[in-house]
Structure formats: structure tokens, C-alpha cells
Amino acid sequence: MDEWLAKAAEGVDLEAPGAFWHVFFNLLNTVPWAAIFWWNLLFVVVGALLGWWRGRLLEGIVWAWVLGPIGWIVVLCKPRQLPRPRPPPLPSSRRRR
């Protein structure tokens, strides 16, 4: 913990008025943003595939984006969405002469 705090406060005058923001941005710089992006993209792709399989493509994408792999469980627990029945076609009109 001491090492983490030292890294966050590195190069920051803690008495300065904007010290909070410097510490905050130093902490944000320690986050592996590229790894988080690629993992999240993987979660969304798998969520889209599961959503497509269950007939809920948009739901699969949104749940996976918001909850990650837990969103997959949400999509899998919902029943399949069956296609709406279409009304029968209208009778063709005959030309009258």
C-alpha cells in the first residue's frame, strides 16, 4: 500500500491547491486501459453472439457492455424471443375488364 501511495503522490506538492487532481491523474495512469478495452470488447462480442443465438442481439450487447460476463448469464436466463407471427397475406386482387 505504501508503494502505491508513493507512486500516486510522486512529483506532487501535497500542500498545493490542485494536489488532489495530480494524485487522481497519477492513479489513473496506473490503470491498464488497453487491457480493459480489449477485455471489454471480447465481452461485448461474446454477448452479441449469445444475444443473436437467443434472438436478443441488442440486449446481449448492452448487458455484456454494462455487466461483462455477468451480462452473458442475464441473456442466457431470459427465454428465447420467438419471431412474431405474420398475418396471412392479403388476397390478390383480380383485374376486372
Image: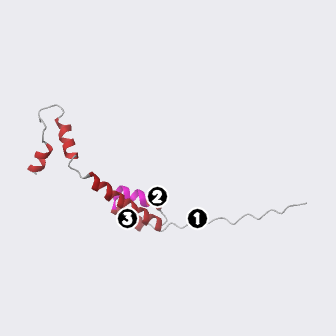
Looking at the picture, does residue 58 appear above or below residue 13?
A: below
Residue marked by disc 2: 58
The colour scheme applied to this rendered structure is secondary structure
Magenta region's main secondary structure?
helix
Q: Amino acid at mark 1?
A: Arg
The residue sitting at 40% across, 61% down in the picture is: 45
Q: Secondary structure at mark 3?
A: helix
Q: As drawn, is 50 to the left or to the right of 93?
A: left
The extreme top residue here reads 17
Q: Secondary structure at mark 2?
A: helix
Q: CA distance from mark 3 to mark 2?
A: 12 Å
Give, as a single range, the part of the protein colored magenta. Answer: 60-68
The extreme front residue here reads 34
Residue 16: mark in rendering? none
Residue marked by disc 3: 72
Q: As drawn, is 61 to the left or to the right of 70?
A: right
Q: Amino acid at mark 3?
A: Trp
On the image, the x and y values in percent for residue 13 come to 12, 35
On the image, the x and y values in percent for residue 58 come to 46, 58
Residue marked by disc 1: 84
Q: Quadrant of residue 93?
A: bottom right
Query: Looking at the image, which is closer to me, 20 or 25?
Result: 25
Q: Is residue 62 magenta?
A: yes
- Mark 3 Cα shell of 10 Å, populated few (<14), some (14-19), many (≥20): many
On the image, the x and y values in percent for residue 94 come to 83, 63
